[in-house]
Amino acid sequence: MTTFSEYLHQHGAEHQLEPALLDTVQTIVSACQTIGRNVRLGALSGVLGEAGTGNIQGEAQKKLDVIANQILIDTLRNNPNVAGLASEEEDDFVAANEQGDYLVLFDPLDGSSNIDINISIGTIFSVLAKPSGSLKTESFLQKGRDQVAAGYVLYGVQTLLVLTFKHGVAVFTLDENGEFVQTHTAPQIPESTAEFAINMSNQRHWEQPVQQYIAALLAGKDGIRGKNYNMRWVASMVAEVHRILMRGGVFMYPKDNRDPSKAGKLRLMYEANPLGLVVEQAGGKITNARENMLDIQPVGLHQRVAVVLGSAEEVETVCQYHL
Ligand code: P6P
């Protein structure tokens, strides 16, 4: 079995990846191993429950949100290759090392509502090359296609690392010694599926095209799609994306009219773009129902988007409903 460090060395040589990029990703993963040790202990280490604070998203923070965020910031700041950071939990970017070549964006603990009930949560990360010139917010506002690395760590039944440098996807499992060992090579998302993921409780708020698409799925084999569908909703995007990576499916968090000023609930820079790069590298698709997610020109660090991702056939069908 190939260890994560061996993989970085081999993959880096095979694809002429910058050592500074490999080192930056190694630091991200090291921070996630520390986060995982906190997550694993739960109540035993007093990390459950509310932090009593809120973030720029207007969300109440869990203790583990704050802990995970601080672990990533403290760890990455000490890496000279990292010029700056952006986090779901930080209003503005965090400057790190002036001579650094890379920017790291992250959702330190996605799916926080699941922390206290022991359902899978995850850390999502995205790496961008730092543009020349002084560091400013605009330095981070790069299209998802321009990411140089992206992935997630899923704290679930197993602790998994899923990573891409845009030369395919690799999956690693944390072993009994706390080291990541490669367990999957180049997983591919099946072209078609009979499984969809959406929060049905928002159905009355959806725009018509989404209402019609989901109604066709619910009609099953008697409807226009001619087959029965199954549904899943974990309320943890990392877990949903991993399920789709492993067995296919379509995940949707569409724009809805609860707050028409918001394009969607999920965030472009540190949720949709990194997860979308993994999905595309595994043969799936990701869109906001109207354009390829990775081609969207960001306008803000915490910009929200509608998300449709997964098996190509279903994502394309959703887009057809929006023409
Ligand atoms: P809802 C978690 O808070 C998250 O950002 C995603 O991980 C997840 O897919 C979604 O929100 C769940 O949202 O409205 O179903 O609680």
Image: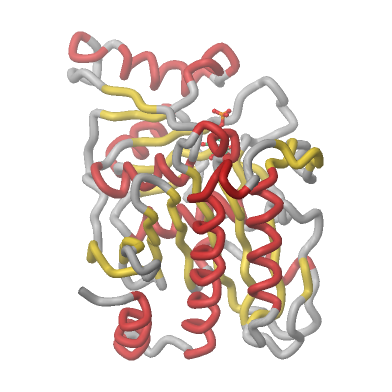
Determine if residue 169 is in view: no
Residue at x 63%, y 40% (from the top left corner): 48
Determine if residue 221 is in view: yes
Tell me residue 270's x, y (percent): 59, 55
Q: How many numbered callouts?
A: 0
Residue 107 vertical position relative to residue 259 in the rendered view, above or below? below
Q: As drawn, is 270 to the left or to the right of 54? A: left
Residue 26 vertical position relative to residue 81 in the rendered view, above or below? above
Locate residue 35: give its quadrant: bottom right
Residue 102 vertical position relative to residue 211 in the rendered view, above or below? below
Taking the image as four quarters, which one is ligand 1 found in?
top right
Q: As drawn, is 97 to the left or to the right of 275? A: right
Q: As drawn, is 95 to the left or to the right of 121? A: right
Residue 24 vertical position relative to residue 149 in the rendered view, above or below? below
Residue closer to the observer: 270 or 136: 270
Locate residue 90: give its quadrant: bottom right
Residue at x 78%, y 44% (from the top left corner): 55
Residue at x 49%, y 44% (from the top left corner): 121
Give the colouring mode of the picture.
Answer: secondary structure
Locate residue 137: give its quadrant: bottom right
Tell me residue 102's x, y (percent): 62, 79
Residue closer to the observer: 133 or 110: 110
Residue at x 63%, y 56% (from the top left corner): 68
Quadrant of the drawing holding the N terminus = bottom left
Tell me residue 185's x, y (percent): 23, 66
